[in-house]
Image: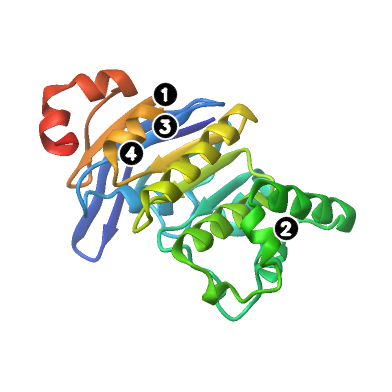
């Protein structure tokens, strides 16, 4: 479904990514792990066209998307749950969800999608008229995921969904990830909790200083001595 071929990203004189090659097959959960500053978030941002590659190709279902606008990519079926949630704090939960469906026109289908998200996240349903900025961190993360799902994506990019959340909420977020996988949504996941990410991932890639150093199934990476020492404790 997704393929990066020799993708590089440069910020001024700094290479954030260099010659990255990775692939995500339909229906998979694939995770990117690595230290802070390794280029994980940049990888998601270049895929969703929030930054431009300085070299290489990005293919979504065989089409080169490296020069498309972000909104064009959303219409193709790609959604991004950004690090830090990025809520519209002064808008309600319902308003944020409405904006997640901005590429869609059928009102009845949008309402049905909103009902689906409220069924998936009952806490949001109870607070639908509450301002997003007044929610807890866990509730904001749920809203960020629900907002992305309002565009009906086939590929979901998730950046640090467990960051700063209590263990109980983290378990709920990963339960949702498993549910989405079961529904056929493909997920590329950046996650600080490498052990948890690899336990739920079909495959993973390890980034160091903007370069991929190894890859494998979740089980293979969890048993790799280098990965264990660097990221699993």
Asked whether, in this view, residue 91 is left or right of residue 210, the answer is right
Nearer-N-terminus badge (3/1): 3
| Above or below: residue 149 compared with residue 92 | above
Relative placement, left or right, of 130 versus 13 is right
Q: CA distance from mark 2 to mark 4?
A: 28 Å
Q: What number is the disc on residue 103? A: 2
Q: Quadrant of the N terminus?
A: top right
Task: Say which residue appears at 19% left-offset and 60% top-offset.
Answer: 14
Q: Horizontal and vertical percent for residue 201?
A: 40, 28
Q: What residue sits 50% from the left and 54% below the top?
A: 81
Residue 196 at x, y = what percent? Answer: 33, 35
Q: CA distance from mark 4 to mark 3?
A: 7 Å
Element type where label 2 sits in the image: loop
Crowding around mark 3 (Cα neighbors within 10 Å: few <14, some 14 to 19, many 20+) is many
Residue sitting nearer the eye, 152 or 44: 152
Q: Are marks 3 and 1 in contact (CB under 8 Å)?
A: yes
Dot 1 corresponds to which residue? 202
Q: Secondary structure at mark 3?
A: strand
Callout in the foreground (2, 4):
4
Where residue 176 appears, as percent x and y from the top left, is 55, 40
Q: Secondary structure at mark 1?
A: loop
Q: Quadrant of the C terminus?
A: top left
Q: Which mark is residue 30?
A: 3
Q: Which residue is mark 4?
A: 32
Mark 3 or 2: the one toward you: 3
In space, the residues marked 1 and 4 are separated at their CA atoms by 12 Å
Q: Please give the name of the residue rendered at 84% of the width and 50% of the height, measured from the top-left corner.
A: 109
């Amino acid at each position: 479904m997704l393929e990066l071929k020799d993708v590089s990203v440069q910020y001024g004189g700094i290479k954030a990514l260099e010659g990255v090659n990775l692939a995500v097959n339909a229906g998979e959960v694939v995770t990117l792990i690595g230290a802070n500053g390794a280029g994980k978030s940049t990888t998601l941002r270049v895929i969703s066209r929030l930054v431009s590659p300085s070299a290489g190709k990005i293919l979504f279902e065989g089409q080169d998307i490296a020069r498309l606008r972000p909104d064009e990519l959303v219409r193709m079926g790609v959604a991004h749950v950004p690090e830090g949630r990025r809520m519209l704090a002064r808008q309600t939960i319902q308003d944020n969800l409405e904006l997640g469906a901005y590429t869609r026109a059928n009102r009845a289908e949008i309402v049905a999608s909103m009902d689906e998200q409220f069924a998936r996240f009952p806490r949001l349903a109870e607070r639908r008229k509450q301002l997003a900025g007044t929610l807890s961190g866990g509730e904001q993360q749920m809203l960020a995921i629900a907002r992305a799902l309002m565009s009906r994506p086939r590929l979901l990019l998730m950046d640090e969904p467990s960051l700063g959340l209590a263990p109980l909420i983290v378990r709920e977020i990963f339960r949702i990830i498993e549910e989405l996988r079961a529904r056929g949504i493909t997920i590329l996941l950046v996650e600080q909790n490498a052990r948890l990410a690899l336990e739920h991932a079909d495959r993973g890639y390890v980034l160091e200083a903007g370069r991929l150093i190894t890859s494998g199934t979740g089980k293979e990476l969890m048993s790799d001595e280098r990965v264990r020492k660097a990221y699993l404790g």
